[in-house]
Image (cartoon, rainbow, N blue to C red):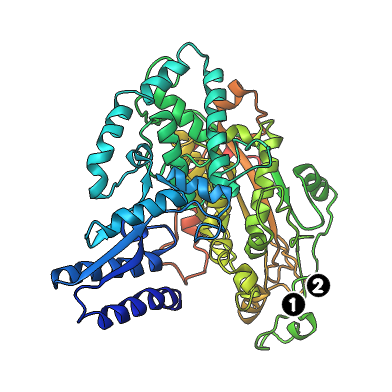
Amino acid sequence: PHTLHTTLTAKIDTTHTLHTALQHHPDVTLVTYSSAAATFGNPGQANYGAANAFQDALAHQRHRSGLRATAIGWGLWDTTDGMAGGLGRAELDRIAAAGVLPIDVHQGLAALDAVLDADRPTVLPVRLNLNAFAARDAVPPMLSRLVRPARRRAATGAGGTGELARRLAGQSAQEQTAFLTDLVRAEVDVVLGRTDGEPVDPQRPFRELGVDSLTAVELRNRLVAATGVPLAATAVFDHPTPAALVEHLRTVVAGPDGAAPATPTIRTAVAVADDPVAIVAMSCRFPGGVTSPEHLWRVVADGVDTVGDFPTDRGWNVDDLFDPDPAAVGRTYTRQGGFLLDADTFDADFFEISPREAAAMDPQQRLLLETSWEAIEAAGMDPADLRGSDTGVFVGVITSDYVTRLGHTPASVEGHVSTGTTTSVASGRIAYTLGLEGPAITVDTACSSSLVALHLAAGSLRSGECSLALVGGATVMAGPVNFVEFSRQRALSPDGRCKAFSSSADGTGWGEGVGVIILERLSDARRNGHPVLAVVRGSAVNQDGASNGLTAPHGPSQERVIRQALASGGLSAGDVDV
């Protein structure tokens, strides 16, 4: 309300006061300075448009009552001391691109003389670029007759698609791309007011360049005017990088091979049920400072114990948290687990993520981003080459206590907490950051989450839903809630170590880690020259159903899922070594 009050009071109260004072003076003309914003609208100035619309309406009402009034809906003046005096070159260029041109002082004074002699309730002394208005989706009704010829010119190729097609004819796809890239870069520079001379990175998202919803439409309008290509108002969001927008323009005008106009194509999935699924790369972080699969193997082969004391960098009050009595409320009777080193560190700049957003991101999301990148490189691929591909992302995430570590939402991270701590974003952020367009699924089936993610990814590859899949999982315990909960259930091992096959087994131990593997159909892996580390012959998923308790294991169900997995891989139990 306060943003409306100041403007409405200045316009409405004063105008109404003058109107009331002049009601008994029919020979006096009430002249008010309104604005073209009342007719055309003006982004970010709804209050100003509404206040001036009142002036226009009051002038019409006075005329109907036999009183004299004229509301002058001024457009932009080319002066240094008027309302536009504080605008910079970029703002003025954007206004011009929207179809409004400035009038100089002599034109304005001549327009004022003509207006005062016209005896009309409302007039619009505005200079318009009708070609710019012709590129708009919606045109004010009063201008539709005027802009129709400009739209016809664009439709018939006078400066439109036909001319651009002729310009691109005979060029290679690379030459066409280079020409259109220069064009898009130039228009981006104009709408953003860029004057540093540095060329726009064609792979950088428009959002990161500073293009918002308003400048996105302005950019689209300028490209329509420059190319004649009928772009949707959402073109910049549909094709979120200059390179993607260039390819869209090139395909629309010249076709995918540069020869003929293209029609939209839909990628058709091809089922390949009989093709095994290969693991072609791995990356990981685990307790004990493990940062690679090779390092993990050394830890396992050497029997290294990576369980240690509670971390001291997470704000846990370890002394108050520990109590050897399993019945102690809010306490845990173990003070050890397997914890990642440096779980709080993240190279935000590398992924072009702001420090504020990085602080709001669950460490599990950060680690999955880093290990996904490492896995792609381990396969001998460039992450940039996967942008726009049908690569899928399948990750298991079951812990979501980072938001509780924030306590209340600090003002510095507001706006990023929901995406930073929502588990579904764990897979979506990888897909967004790397530009992957296959399935993106976060799985939570408790301890089996990463395995179920692998099962889903293999099925997606076999059905042709994706041709490559990033699969993994992450667990980082931002708070001690799991230790406290399992202490109440008497389910923790006092020394924090699992002894699953030992007569001394005395409970579970909690640990952290992140791992990502890359899956590919075996035939594709061999054709692409990727290393085949292992082959997934089969997998299966089921549930216990109504067993002996919500969390209790059920032997027959476990036997059944093992038989299903063996059958899906065409194997028998005797074919399994370990």
Return the residue at label 1.
316
Disc sitting over residue 312 in the figure: 2
Q: Is residue 112 above or below residue 139?
A: below
Out of 441 and 150, give the one closest to the viewer: 150
Q: Is residue 314 above or below residue 138?
A: below
Farthest residue, direction top = 170
**Residue at the image position 63 percent from the left and 65 percent from the top:** 360
**Residue at the image position 41 percent from the left and 76 percent from the top:** 10
Report which quarter residue 403 is drawn in.
Answer: bottom right
Q: SS for tag 2?
A: loop
Residue 476 horizontal/vertical position (percent): 67, 63
Amino acid type for the residue under numbered disc 2: Thr
Residue 264 horizontal/vertical position (percent): 36, 29
Relative horizontal placement of residue 561, taking residue 60 as reference (left or right):
right
Q: Are marks 1 and 2 in contact (CB under 8 Å)?
A: yes
Q: Quadrant of the N terminus?
A: bottom left
Out of 293 and 251, give the one closest to the viewer: 251
Residue 369 horizontal/vertical position (percent): 65, 49
Amino acid type for the residue under numbered disc 1: Trp
Farthest residue, direction front = 27
Distance between the alpha carbons at the discs numbered 1 and 2? 7 Å
